[in-house]
């Protein structure tokens, strides 16, 4: 296999590159108002399904709204919702998984059987069911996705703790007189975070995809407020006559999911390299 050359020859360089890309993406999402020339909610029936032009670089939708402005405005909502889901599920799942692995016994058995029950259903079907019961809206989507997402982190954290608590350095900490709480939070947890962080970084892309799917089904952000999923839903009626109404939101989802996937891979490479060096 040929060696990598140039800037991408090391895991650290690849990580820094994708970190910069993710940073630019975050700045773009947060600074959305600076890029908007038109009101994303403004209806203009004189400009219905206009093709991309100098005035509307991504065209307009079925009621004359600027697709670029709606795409940019919807970016902050989509990315914020995905990051919120990942952060909440990461904290809840890691905490529960660590406690299950460290305490064990009946607590571990009951919690893991519940996790098994949740994971027995396809995750998207379960999420849609919860979102449908709660009703449409950004907060309800976050709750629905959190109700499913934490189980993966819990299982991963538990497996890490079960492996680490038998290690020599944990036994040494126990013999030295450290309390069980101190051993868990100061010795075991820091050493179990690597796969959890990698999983979280990759989860952002799938969370954006899931949130867009819920919005496409009418369970996410309510119209007329823009979000990539409901933009796809709005554009499906004009797909044949005005394909740009679907192409640009779809490309936005695809690009962001790919970026987050590559970012997760770069984190995995970097952490594995450090682990191999330490060994």
Image: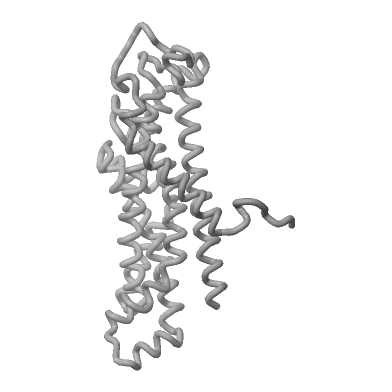
Q: Position of residue 143 (x, y in %)?
A: 28, 48
Q: Which residue is the extreme one toward the top?
A: 46
Q: Eyeballing the image, is 128 above or below 201? A: above
- In the depicted view, which residue is nearer to us: 12 or 170? 12
Residue at 35% x, 17% y: name it.
Answer: 65
Q: Which residue is the extreme one toward the front?
A: 6
Colour basis = one colour
Residue at 64% x, 51% y: name it.
Answer: 6
- Report the label total: 0
Q: Taking the image as drawn, is residue 265 in sight?
A: no
Q: Eyeballing the image, is 48 above or below 105? A: above
Q: Position of residue 149 (x, y in %)?
A: 37, 54
Q: Position of residue 54 (x, y in %)?
A: 46, 14
Indicate the quadrant where residue 190 lies. Answer: bottom left
Residue at 55% x, 61% y: name it.
Answer: 269
Quarter the C terminus occupies: bottom right
- In the depicted view, which residue is nearer to us: 184 or 190? 190
Residue at 39% x, 90% y: name it.
Answer: 172
- In the depicted view, which residue is nearer to us: 230 or 69? 69
Q: Position of residue 242 (x, y in %)?
A: 49, 16
- In the depicted view, which residue is nearer to us: 116 or 83? 83
Quarter the N terminus occupies: bottom right
Q: Eyeballing the image, is 142 above or below 107? A: above
Q: Taking the image as drawn, is residue 69 in sight?
A: yes
Q: Eyeballing the image, is 132 above or below 121? A: above
Indicate the quadrant where residue 140 lies. Answer: top left
Indicate the quadrant where residue 125 lies. Answer: top left
């Amino acid at each position: 296999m040929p060696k990598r050359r140039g800037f991408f020859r090391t895991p650290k360089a690849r990580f820094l590159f994708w970190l910069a890309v993710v940073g630019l993406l975050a700045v773009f999402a947060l600074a959305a108002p600076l890029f908007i020339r038109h009101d994303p909610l403004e209806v203009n029936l004189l400009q219905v399904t206009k093709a991309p032009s100098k005035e509307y670089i991504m065209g307009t939708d079925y009621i004359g709204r600027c697709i670029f402005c709606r795409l940019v405005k919807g970016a902050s909502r989509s990315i914020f919702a995905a990051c919120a889901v990942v952060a909440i599920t990461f904290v809840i799942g890691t905490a529960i998984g660590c406690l299950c692995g460290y305490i064990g016994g009946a607590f571990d058995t009951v919690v893991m059987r519940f996790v098994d029950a949740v994971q027995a259903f396809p995750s998207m079907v379960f999420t849609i069911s919860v979102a449908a019961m709660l009703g449409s809206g950004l907060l309800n989507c976050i709750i629905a996705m959190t109700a499913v997402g934490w189980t993966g982190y819990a299982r991963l954290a538990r497996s890490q703790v079960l492996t680490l608590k038998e290690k020599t350095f944990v036994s040494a900490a126990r013999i030295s007189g450290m309390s069980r709480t101190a051993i868990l939070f100061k010795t075991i947890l820091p050493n179990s975070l690597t796969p959890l962080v990698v999983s979280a970084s990759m989860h952002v892309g799938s969370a954006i995809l899931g949130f867009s799917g819920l919005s496409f089904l009418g369970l996410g952000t309510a119209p007329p407020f823009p979000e990539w999923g409901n933009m796809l839903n709005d554009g499906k009626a004009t797909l044949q006559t005005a394909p740009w109404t679907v192409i640009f939101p779809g490309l936005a989802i695809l690009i962001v999911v790919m970026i987050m996937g590559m970012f997760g891979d770069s984190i995995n490479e970097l952490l594995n390299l450090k682990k191999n060096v330490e060994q």
